[in-house]
Amino acid sequence: MLENGGTSQPIFLDCTFRDGGYYNAWDFAPQTVLDYLEAMPATGVDVLEMGFRSLKMKGFAGAAAYTTDEWLKTLPLPEGKTIGVMVNGAELVGETPQTEVLERLFPHPASESPVYLVRVACHVHEFEKALPAVNWLKDRGYQVGYNLMQVSDRTEDEIKALARAAAKYPLDVLYFADSFGSMDPDQAAQIIQWMRTEWSGPMGIHTHDNKGLALSNSMRAIAEGVTWVDSTVTGMGRGPGNARTEELAIEVASHRGQNINYVPLMKLLRKHFKPMQERYGWGTNPYYYLAAEHSIHPTYIQTMLGDARYDEEDILAVIEHLRVEGGAKYDMHTMDAAREFYGGEPAGEWAPKELMDGREVLLLGTGPGVSTYQEPLEQFIRKTKPLVIALNTQTGISSDLINIRAASHPIRLLADSEIHAELPQPLLTPFSMLPDDARASLGGKEVLDFGLQVQADTFSFAEKHCVAPTSLVMAYVFAAVASGNASKLYLAGFDGFPAGDSRNNQSQKILNQYIEHEGSVPLVAITPTTYDVPQASVYGML
């Protein structure tokens, strides 16, 4: 059995292939696996948790999603290191009898398997129902740990009751996970103290780095008597990731009074994990920090950061929605609903025809083209006298040449409310449909209340409201111009994003949908653009 010899020396577990798999579907390149197995013995790691053990077969997932004995036997597993797998408790408490699930997950006893340690990750509501699996696994010779998830916002009585339930079974280690990354060291210590009143066996902690405290929380836990700690290489793991093996190795070696060879681990980082981190983008940032503050599941943030449909305002809007409605459990549909504020019946009180009927309109985007071509654009405005609409707080040309400003995203309005209050132009916005805080932030600002409803892949233009495929202000103004029966729409500052940026595809799709609509207004870009739209030169119009 893996033990710490009755001392306070921690058992050090690396779970890179298990937790890191949330970014690459547990599909690690064979050479990455081989180099990892070669590097780990030098780090002081005691346990290698090589992945999940699962029966789920929906969609493609790599070998570390199943971590079968057959796969493990093909690998040069380092001698003297314990090999572990993790099972999701949800698979043990479903409709299929628990014993049947376990027999399929672990067809061989530990004596015939490369696996010795099995950890079971459980939400609070699954924990007691999943605990009988301890006896089955122990009878098969496995060492067993249970990981309690999402306990940071549980009461003292709840945590003690969970520890009391665990004490009825021959568990080898009881872990708790800082699932939301919201704990600080004092909170981690408090949970340890509460659990200790009912659980006298070995304890472990799994930390997340939403607030940059994963390592600090792990070390405080060791100081409080926790004897199992884990980490991942470069912190690779769901959301912002975990304590980093390369840092925890240093701390554990110091705690043990050992000297370790860091060279193989640093080579592993340079060759494999730093390039993966650049590709997938794990690591803490302000969004994860905010999510941790409000106990919001980090997968919401991870998913939005990897989806070009979500800009800064969208992500903040979803966080605010989940702060109020609750986001402890990840639900993709909840996230999409939170992103779009305009799903209900559209309402508005202003008709764009009042200002646009039969007129040419110049729309100033947020790209650098407005500032770059400021002088010819200003000459064009003075000569042609179009109705000039600026998106958000665009200031690339003289303010006295701008007739209207437009904004449609509530979070952007909140962020820019003080600026809008100082700007002299009326604001085109779906005012009647904004949340109370967004309306209040505009104070006595003159608004042109044109309603908006968001429906995928749809444009529709009514007298005082529109339907658009997104709440992006670009699409909103396109629809307002069509509703206003303008004669022509000039675009400036629609430069496009750098090559390879997926936002180009999103914007081009909106442009295509608008241009193809029979009620749209003919448009032409008069400053350079990468979009596939009609183009002309502002210089040729002077």
Image (tube, helix red, strand yellow):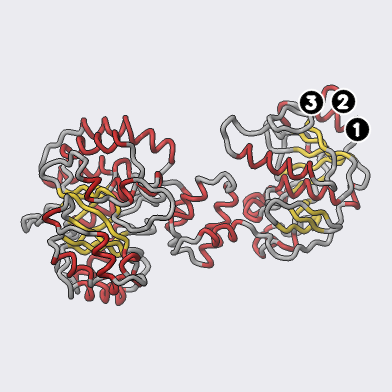
Q: Relative to 535, does residue 480 appear above or below in the rendering?
A: below
Residue depicted at 64% across the width and 51% down the height: 412
Sequence-wise, the earlier of marks 3 and 2 is 3
Sequence-wise, the earlier of marks 1 and 2 is 1
Mark 3 secondary-structure assignment: helix
- Report whether 58 appears left or right of 103: right
Picture coordinates of residue 429 (x, y %)? Answer: 75, 54
Q: Disc 1 vs disc 2: which is toward the camera?
A: 2
Residue at the spot of label 3: 375
Mark 1 secondary-structure assignment: helix
Q: Could you tell me which quadrant the C terminus lies in?
A: top right
Front residue of 455 and 329 = 455
Amino acid beneath label 1: Thr
Residue depicted at 22% across the width and 59% down the height: 106
Mark 2 secondary-structure assignment: helix
Picture coordinates of residue 145 (x, y %)? Answer: 21, 61
Residue depicted at 30% across the width and 34% down the height: 269
Amino acid beneath label 2: Met
Q: Could you tell me which quadrant the N terminus lies in?
A: bottom left
Sequence-wise, the earlier of marks 1 and 3 is 3
Residue at the spot of label 2: 541
Residues at marks 1 and 2 touching, judged by CB atoms closer than 8 Å: yes
Picture coordinates of residue 81 (x, y %)? Answer: 14, 46
Residue at the spot of label 1: 384
Label number found at residue 341: none
